[in-house]
Amino acid sequence: SQELEQSPQSLIVQEGKNLTINCTSSKTLYGLYWYKQKYGEGLIFLMMLQKGGEEKSHEKITAKLDEKKQQSSLHITASQPSHAGIYLCGADISAGNNRKLIWGLGTSLAVNP
Amino acid sequence: NAGVTQTPKFRILKIGQSMTLQCTQDMNHNYMYWYRQDPGMGLKLIYYSVGAGITDKGEVPNGYNVSRSTTEDFPLRLELAAPSQTSVYFCASSYPPRGNEQFFGPGTRLTVL
């Protein structure tokens, strides 16, 4: 089974609506990273969360880390067509010096004008 | 800074042919990674390197080879291309002392026929 589960798998929203994407780990999280990918392009780093309860915002995107639930949520307020793409979460599940991340399968977001 | 660059952007190979995917970063990052991304399967780590002269296998190394003779370059070699290697390949780099977020190149789309 997938160690890092993302939900939903895909999402279609009307422009202006809010939405939330979740990323849940089956293992202890030592860091959680959110990326966005446009079709045919590379991954763009959005935010990194490292401490339980941490919350970060950039423009209309807010990410939170719930350490107890081993889960992070990505919330987009007043969505715009420019928010469309695939959102991926990556997680550091090793307390040591292993600098590999595990990845969710991604959430595909479409925003209808 | 150009960041992480990859060449070529697209390539079609015949079964049994070989090729090298190039990856270069100009951020002086010590960690570098190669991933493949297949539809619905997320990112799978092929190989990674923690510094010049040091490489290690990821989840899906079979059919690939890497080398890291300099900090900047991390080429991925396919010796005998197979249809199962049709995928999008991403190179990434990171500098853990400043954070474990990975910086991605634009990707190489490879088709093996």
Image (cartoon, coloured by chain):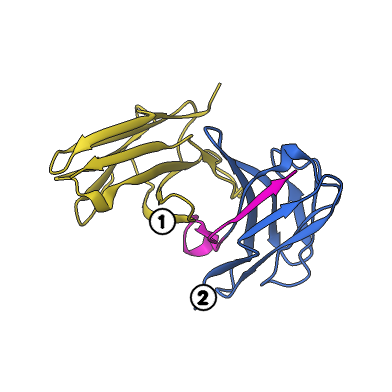
Chain colours: A yellow, B blue
Above or below residue B25? Residue A13 is: above
Instruction: Name above or below for residue A51 compared with residue B1.
Output: above
User: Magenta stretch: residue A98 in it?
Assistant: no
- Magenta segment range? B93-113
**B80 horizontally vs B89: left or right:** right
Q: Nearer the viewer, residue B92 or A70?
A: B92
| Residue B49 relative to residue B19: left or right | left
| Image label count | 2
The location of residue B46, given as percent across then percent down, is 69, 45
Q: Residue at x 44, y 37 (%)?
A: A106
Q: Secondary structure at mark 1?
A: strand
What residue occupies the far top of the structure in this picture?
A1
Screen quadrant of the N terminus of chain A: top right
Say left or right for B88 vs A108: right
> Residue visible at 64% across and 54% down?
B33
Could you say which is closer to the camera, residue A57 or residue A81? A81
Asked whether B101 falls inside the magenta stretch, the response is yes
Residue B24 image-quadrant placement: bottom right
Q: Chain of mark 1?
A: A
Of all chains, the one bearing label 2 is B
Packing grade of label 2 (10 A; few <14, some 14-19, many >=20) is few
Q: Which mark is residue A81?
A: none
Quadrant hosting residue B5? bottom right
**Residue at the extreme bottom of the image, as rendered:** B1
Q: Write down the residue under mark 2.
A: B2
Counting from the top left corner in percent of width and height, residue A104 is at 48, 35
Q: Which residue is mark 1?
A: A45
Three-letter residue code for mark 2: Ala
Which quarter of the rendered picture does the C terminus of chain A lie within? top left
Q: Label 2 vs label 1: CA separation?
A: 16 Å
Residue at x-position 77% and y-position 60%: B20
